[in-house]
Amino acid sequence: MENEHEQGKGLTRREFLSAGIVSGAAIILTQNLPAATTQKVKKTDVWVFHGKDKKKLINACLKVISDNGGFGKGAKKLTLKVNAAWYRTPEQGANTHPELVDAFLIGCKKMGIKEVVMPEHSCDDPRKSFPRSGLLQVAQKNGAKMYSLGGNRKLYKEVKIPKGKRLKKALVGKDFLETDALVNIPVAKHHGSARLSIAMKNWMGAVRDRGYWHRNNLHQCIADFSTFIKPTWTIIDATRIMLDRGPKGPARNLKHPNLIILSRDQVAADAYASTLFPGVGPTKVGYLKIAREMKIGTTEVSKMAVHKIEVS
């Protein structure tokens, strides 16, 4: 799977079809699945949606979510972890695309969610980064509460991380802990220190002290936190991805795969997304290698049930 997408270009429908995708959002082809009579171990489900219409991509994604347990029985409050860390426009690829979040928020209401909160501990000034990202506007439009965690101690709760090796405890935004459903919707991009920033790395915007992670084996801390935080769903924005100069950019090379990736397993979602980056893949990302060793989730694409959906 590594390096299969040509740098700097979007993934065409023909290329997506040639990879084993059946046309039509309602028709799914599952790769690498043996016959039901011989399959002994259930593979980790990962859905990959391809298309240029972001609203349709999210609607197809929400249909799969609905068909696979939704956000949990009786869920009314949903906490959404976007990436709104940087003072960048949507098309520059540093933050989650607002059109995806807009469609997601609209769809949540239809699925019975009454309250959505979007906390974020941004790197750039949130008074500038939130509106420039376009995410504040879609939150306000849909009645979701987007707010900055910043350094305000009252907005965090200290938790222990029993399985952590370097990260034993952390101050975590309360709304990430006190909610009916937790959804992570990061953007996939290059990162100068972590190599890639996708879902697992996106949780750094949920904690008060990001600096500790950088000072104490960043890759191990990312993996450690992922032993603790377990999102209901992970939805990766790979509609456009920064191939360099991340996490803020602007990138010299911006690629448009026009994909979103969905899974309950955040490690599997990251591992699959890593294959979109030339020369990378899950064996080349430190925190994914650690996640495999710690058995946090699935990192081998061959052990995933990859459902590819063409959204037209």
Image (tube, rainbow, N blue to C red):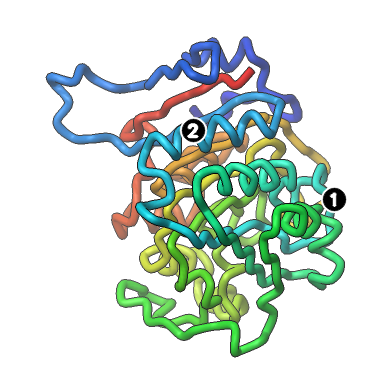
Q: Residues within 10 Å of mark 1 (few under 14, many from 20)?
A: some
Residue lying at 68% horizontally and 33% vertically, measured from the top left: 55
Observer-nearest residue: 142 or 16?
Answer: 142
Q: Give, as a three-letter code, the residue at label 1.
A: Thr
Q: Residue 70, located in which quarter of the rendered image?
A: top left
Q: Mark 1 points at which residue?
A: 89
Q: Is 294 above or below relative to 11?
A: below
Residue 1: where, in percent of width, then height?
Answer: 49, 27
Which callout, 1 or 2, points to the residue nearer the camera?
A: 2
- The tag earlier along the polypeptide, 1 or 2, is 2
Residue lying at 60% horizontally and 76% vertically, measured from the top left: 210
Q: Residue 17, located in which quarter of the rendered image?
A: top right
Q: Mark 2 points at which residue?
A: 63
Residue 269: where, in percent of width, then height?
Answer: 47, 43
State the CA–CA distance, disc 1 to disc 2. 29 Å
Residue 197: where, in percent of width, then height?
Answer: 61, 54
Locate the C terminus and report the quarter of the image it occupies. top right
Say whether residue 248 is left or right of residue 224.
right
Q: Give, as a three-letter code, the residue at label 2.
A: Lys
| Element carrying mark 1 | loop
Observer-nearest residue: 284 or 137?
Answer: 137
Residue at the outermost bottom position: 153
Q: Is 257 above or below relative to 192?
A: above
Say whether residue 89 is left or right of residue 80.
right
